[in-house]
Image (cartoon, rainbow, N blue to C red):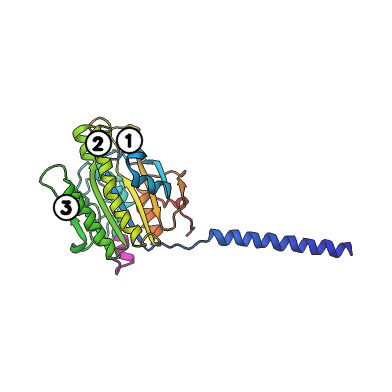
Amino acid sequence: MKRLVAIALFCCVTLAAVGQAYAQHDDSAASNPIKHVLLIGWDGYGSAYVNWDEVPNLKMMKENGAWTLKTRCVLPSVSAINWASILMGAGSELHGYRTWGSSKPDLPSRVLTDKGKFPDIFSVVHQQRPDALTASAFTWKTIGDLHENPDEAHTTYIHSDEHAHSPEHYQKLVDTTIGYLKENSVLTFVYFSEPDVAGHENGWGSEVYHQKVAEMDGYVGQIIKYLQDNDCLKDTLVIFVSDHGGTGKGHGHETMQDMETPFIIYGAGVKKGEIESVVVNYDTAATIAWALQLTAPDCWRGKPVKSAFEFKE
């Protein structure tokens, strides 16, 4: 009799353990809800200058998403090289962009698509999901040379005759981006030239620099509010990046103020908390491809930041 009771007890404990393990496995196997990705880029926003109280919209994204202030740019810490790396999933030794304002590779790209460019996140979407709408809006002309552009109707360069852009220019950038989101763009990229311009003119960390940071945060808030008000965040992933920081009135120096930038992931499928894994600028493209369930090109060296998501694959 005692033996039968012992066997029955053993069976009960075993079944309970199996059930618990299954439940834990089931919980970890959350499905990927992401159908759209919005990539927001600020030029020249270094982690050394982040004050969360002056950027309430980025702070909200950080507190409700995954984030790190330890993202490293590729060297040298200048714009075209790093925006190419962000969009192309690899460093300059492969994509070939080596100077501040490169509009074409300074060295031959290791791999070329049928459009004659190194593979970037837009070309990956275009190749693997040819019917998907993509969109890009930017205030620096060179950005258009660093990725495979969507069709003319969904590629917008908002320019100014002056070095800096006015609030009217940035409002047009925001309105254009929201218009693309309304069209259900699968991948939307919006690029802001600030606070880099303020850094060059007034110094990184200057009063004007921080004023521009606060101004840019307000524009981001408008875009996020549209997503919130229209219940888009249930299937939209938002990624915030910058290309580099700076010191004095320049960048490209080998200092951590130049090299470290914020990286924030917010929205569908994101696990809240600080990202502990190593993040490099070129991980951005890989993360977008993985989130959209696309196959990254073999020539990319970036890795998806999987620890920032609730789902596994």
To which residue does mark 2 refer? 209
Q: Secondary structure at mark 3?
A: loop
Q: Which residue is mark 3?
A: 158
* Label 3, label 1: how far apart the Cα atoms are: 27 Å
Is 193 drawn above or below residue 14 in the view shown? Answer: above
Would residue 57 be found to the left or right of residue 103 on screen?
A: right
Residue 172 shows in this picture: yes
Contact between labelled residues 3 and 2, with CB atoms less than 8 Å apart: no
Examine the rendered structure and indicate whether residue 120 appears above or below residue 132. above
What secondary structure is marked by label 1?
helix
Classify residue 125 by image quadrant.
Answer: bottom left
Q: Is residue 262 left or right of residue 192?
A: right
The quarter of the rendered structure image containing the N terminus is: bottom right
Q: Does dot 2 land on a helix, a strand or a loop?
A: helix
Pointers 2 and 1 in contact (C-beta within 8 Å):
yes
Q: Which residues are magenta?
A: 123-132
Which residue shows up at 59% across the image and 58% down it?
Answer: 24
Residue 49 image label: 1
Please, what is the three-letter code of the amino acid marked with disc 3? Ile
How far separated are the C-alphas under marks 2 and 3? Answer: 21 Å
Looking at the picture, how far across and down is residue 64, in whole percent?
Answer: 43, 50
